[in-house]
Each structure stands twice: as C-alpha cells, then as structure tokens.
Amino acid sequence: MNLSFKYRFILSFLAIEITFISLIVFVNFNALSKLSDSLIEDKIETGTRLFSEMIKTPMVVYDLGTLDNHSTNFTHMRNIIAVKVFDTQQRLLSSSNSDPSFNIDLFTNAKDTVTLEGRTFRLQTAPIILEGEKIGDVKILFELTQSLKTIAENRKITFLIILLEIAISSIIAYWMGHRLTSALNQLTLCAQEISDEKSPNIPDLSDRNDELTILSNTLQLMQKRIDERNKNLTTALHESKVLNKELHAAKEAAEASTRAKSQFLASMSHEIRTPMNGVMGMLQLLEYSPLTDAQRNNVRIAQSSANSLLGLINDILDFSKIEAGKMDFEQITFDLHNELDAFIEIMTLKAKEKGLELVLDTTQLPQGMIISDPGRLRQILTNLVSNAIKFTAKGKIALAVALKKEDPTHGRLYIDVTDTGIGIAQEKIDSLFEMFTQADGSTTRQYGGTGLGLAIVKKLSNLMGGTVSATSTIKEGSTFSVNILVELATSSTVHKEQEVSKSPIIDQENPVWPSTTNILLVDDDPVNKMVAEELLKVVGLQTHTASNGAEALEILKAAQSKPYTLIFMDCQMPVMDGYQTTHVIRNGEAGEQYKNIPIIAMTANAMAGDREKCLFWGMNDYISKPIDINELQNALKEWVFAAKEPLL
C-alpha cells in the first residue's frame, strides 16, 4: 500500500508513541507495585514489632490484665483483625478478635495472602525476644482488603491517564506530520530518557507554534505528573518512617514510666513489709508473754502505730491495684445497720481522744439489708471519717447514711460526712481527690498523711457505680458526700463482718494437729524465720527451716522416712528463689511423694498480680507479710486437714 510520507510518519509516530507509553506503563506499574508491596510489608512488620515490644513488660511480670488490655487496644486499630500471644511452651496467654466472624486459627501459613468472602488477609507470626532470649510468640491477623483496593484504584487511574495521553498524542501526531522533521530526533531522545527513568531535557518549541510545540508541552506535562507522583510517594514514605519513629519513642517512654513506677512500688512494698513482719510478729508474740497492764498497753500502742504504717502501705498498694484494674469486689448480703454500729464504735474511740463528738444519723435508712462489698464500704467510711477527725480540733462530726430505691432490685446509698474543722478553700476542692494531694503543704506538715485517702475514695466510688464530691467553708467545716450503687437484699441471709479481735487467735483453743504434721519453713531472712517459727509454736506446731530453695530441696530429699506435710515458701531468696524451688518440687526432683505437697507462699510481695504469680508457679496458697496469726492458723487448718491438688 502506497502511503504518503505524512501518513507513514503518523503511523510510525503512533507506533513509537504506543511503544513509549507501554514502557512508561510497565516501568511505573512495576515501580508502583514494588513500592506498594514494600509499604504493606513495612506496615505489617512495623505493627508486629511494635506490638511485640509493647507486651514484653507484661509478659515478664506475668501481668495478664495489662497484656489483655494491650491485645484489645491493638485489635481496635485499623486493619488489625485478631491477635494471640503465647509463652515459650505455646500456652495461650492472651487473645483478642475485633471481628469474631474470622477466626485466626483458620489461617495456618504465615505470610500467605488468603482471600475469604471477598476480603484479603495476611497472617503474621513472630517470636518475642527479650535481651536475646525468646520469651514467647505472637500471631497477628492483618486485613489487606482496603490497601489492595487502593492500589488497584491507583493503577486504574494511572492506566486511564495514560490512555488519555495516547489519545491526545494521536490527535496531535495527525496534524503535525509535515513539521516533525526539525524536532523529531530531539523528541525521540526525550522519550528514550523518560523510558530510562531519567530527567529529560525537553526542548522549547514554543517559537514554532505548531504540533511539535504541543507534543513538547504534553511531554513536559507527563514528566511533571510523574515527578509529582514520585515526589508524593517519597514524601509519604518519609512521613511514615518519621511517624513510626515517633510512635516507637513514645511507646518506649510510656513503657519506661510504667515500668519504673511498678518497680518502685514493688520494691518499696517488699522492703518495708520485710522489717514490718519482724516488728508486728514480735508484737503479736509479746501478747502471749506475762505482761503488766502498763506493758500490755504499751504493746497495744505499738501495734496501733504498726497497723497505721501498714495501713499506709496498703493504701499505696490499693491505689496501684485500682490503676492497674486489679481491684476485686465482693457481693455479700449484710446488715448495713450492724456494719455502721460496729464502725461507729471503733471510730468513736478515736474521736473521744480529741474530745470530739461523733454522731450517726440513719433516719433515712429504712432498709438495712443490702448486697455489696462491706470491706470496700468500710474503707470509704474509714477514710472520710478519719480525715474529718484529723482536721477537726473541736466540735462534732456527723455521719449521715441514706438509702434510696432506684428500681425493684437496686438502690443508691448516700453517705455524708460533715465536720466542724478547718475547712478547705474553694479553689482547692477539685484537686483534693487527686493522689498525693492535700489542701496545701502546711496541711501535710501539721496533720501528716500522704494525700492518698481521698483519691482511693474517689476511685472506689467510681468502681462501685457512684461519685464523690465536697463542699466547704474556711474555719467552719466541710462536708464530703459519696453515693454508690447497691443491690437490695431479697432474703434474710445476713453477712456480718466481725471486728478483728484484740486476741491474735480466733479460736480459744488450738486445734489438735495430726501427729504426722511436719512443717518446713523456707526463708532467707533470720528475723522473719524466727517470727514465723515462734508464731507456729503459738498455734501448737514445730517447724524445720531452710535459708534458700537449694537447701530446702536437700532437706526434702533427706526426709524420706518422716516426710514433710506442708511448706511455707518465701519468694525472693538467694541461690534459688521460691518460684524456681516450687517448680522443681512439682517436677518431682525432691521426690515423688512431694510433687503434690501443699506449698503456701509467705512473702513480702503484695503487689497486684503477685498472688496470681505464686499460683501460676504451682503454689497452693498465699500469705503476705507482715504475717497475721489468724491468717496463718486458717491456712494451716485448710491445708493440713484437707488435702487439695496444687495449681499446676
């Protein structure tokens, strides 16, 4: 077919143009695909790494509550479907699923992309490494549907743009056939540079004012769009890296703060409780000695001071438990009238010491039988009334309690404590319920205290479905008001909280222990060993002692003819601690007959999760120091007279 040069040129130009555009499509699509895949992989790897770093601390201290909170918060993030955390034995520690319709266990091959019900998923697994040692594994199910959809849409848009450019180029080529000669080589060179992903030097053909000028401008526009798209992708990648770095730094700072706080509280609690055990244990033993009335009174004063110090320690621990979400609440049916009478009887003695009158008003309390936590209620009352006594020099303190029915099964308990004390400035009231806060610094110096009491009242009130507030006038007095939600009792079942007797032993007589009873006490502190030995003598039992876990194992192995029946185990000891020792005993390394021996933790570790940690390692029960002889005797009754399987 004979065609003119113009049409041959047009056909040739179109062939070159299509080839050129095809190269652009291939290069750009290939680059975009690789970049998109890289971004998705980076996002998955970053998410997995961040979550692994986030859960290291809760796994090390076996804080399952915090671990569950991290898992739940993580699955609330976009594109995160489910997560599971395992220890080194592949035991499940935590799991969370934001979409129950997709079970993470359905996906078995890590890093395989699977499409189900029109949605695309990727399973990512990774070990959790702490200081070069594996402490567990994590599985995370990511959803890639939206990311892949966005990539596909971008490809479609790019393809349409390229098609549009081909159409425009064809039209231009048809009209510029007779004027291509002068600039054809230059434009071909530019096309080659673009295909090589270089920055072309497109000639300025504006002086020609013809089709070549239009083609030149079109190529310039195409290159500009490519440059802008590449620039945007580079900027997005940079911003993503910066954001990931900031998130990582913020996470590390938050974890460091939480870790420092937990370590400080745990260390302080343990270090204070250890000598307190010696003080309070010896005071309990003194009560069994022949004493004059004056000496007995001195012992009781010392016990009161020691109990006050222990109460301060417990306040700090309670606040820590509340913040960690570890505070437990009972639901017990009890007579509120009896509870209030017993409380007032105790607090009246404290009020009389300062010459104050303490008045109880229950005229608005028609029904006394409720279901709630009497211990936490008493804690609220004690903090409020103790504060009122502390800050009141003369006059009286009134405790008014009212119950209003909200529905057939629930009521709201209203508590008002009014004093005639020093009063509080209006601008200070809002900050009263913050921890470690008092009205001013002089208040702390004059009256003492840490400022934790009202913070605990607020936290407990909120957890019990209520609120707390205060009103006050300087030099006239203050009123603190608390309301909590309670259940109304529907039967005559009554739980009466008995006041702790002044006598250390609940029973008037010690039980008759089996003749085979043989106790082993494992503790590295000489004072604590002596206190425990003497307290056990008071309840009628002799004991043998060991200073660490390794020594205890040797004693157990040697005592095969007359085996031990129960072990009291300290947790923090040199050579071998209580956790390791218990684990070894449960594995039968001390002898098969000791695999199920009752082991009771007797430790100064009293932070949230310490009891659960002891049970996890195989101990049967838990007693915190300072040792209370009532609690000691009750534990002995349970485990000496009733054989139970250990928690393995």
Image (cartoon, rainbow, N blue to C red):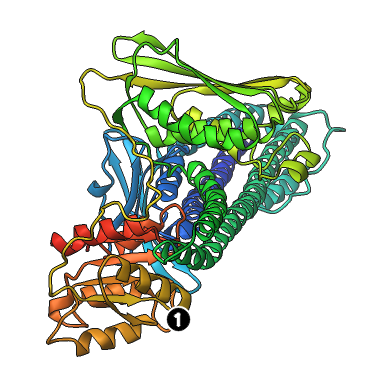
Q: Is residue 219 above or below residue 603?
A: above
Q: Is residue 303 above or below residue 187?
A: below
Judge whether residue 584 can be spotted in this image: yes
- Residue sitting nearer the eye, 140 or 117: 140
**Amino acid bearing label 1:** Pro
Q: In the drawing, does residue 10 fall left or right of residue 580?
A: right
- Residue sitting nearer the eye, 190 or 310: 310
Residue 242 locus on image (x, y percent): 67, 50
Classify mark 1: helix, strand or loop: loop
Q: Residue at x 57, y 37 (%)?
A: 350
Q: Which residue is mark 1?
A: 574
Q: Is residue 478 above or below residue 311?
A: above
Residue 47 locus on image (x, y percent): 49, 50
Residue at far right of view: 207
Q: Residue at x 26, y 87 (%)?
A: 555
Q: In the drawing, does residue 424 fall left or right of residue 325?
A: right
Residue 119 locus on image (x, y percent): 33, 36
Residue 147 locus on image (x, y percent): 46, 39
Q: Residue at x 28, y 62 (%)?
A: 90
- Residue sitting nearer the eye, 23 or 33: 33
Badge 1 local density, few (<14 within 10 Å), some, or many (20+)? few
Judge whether residue 125 can be spotted in this image: no
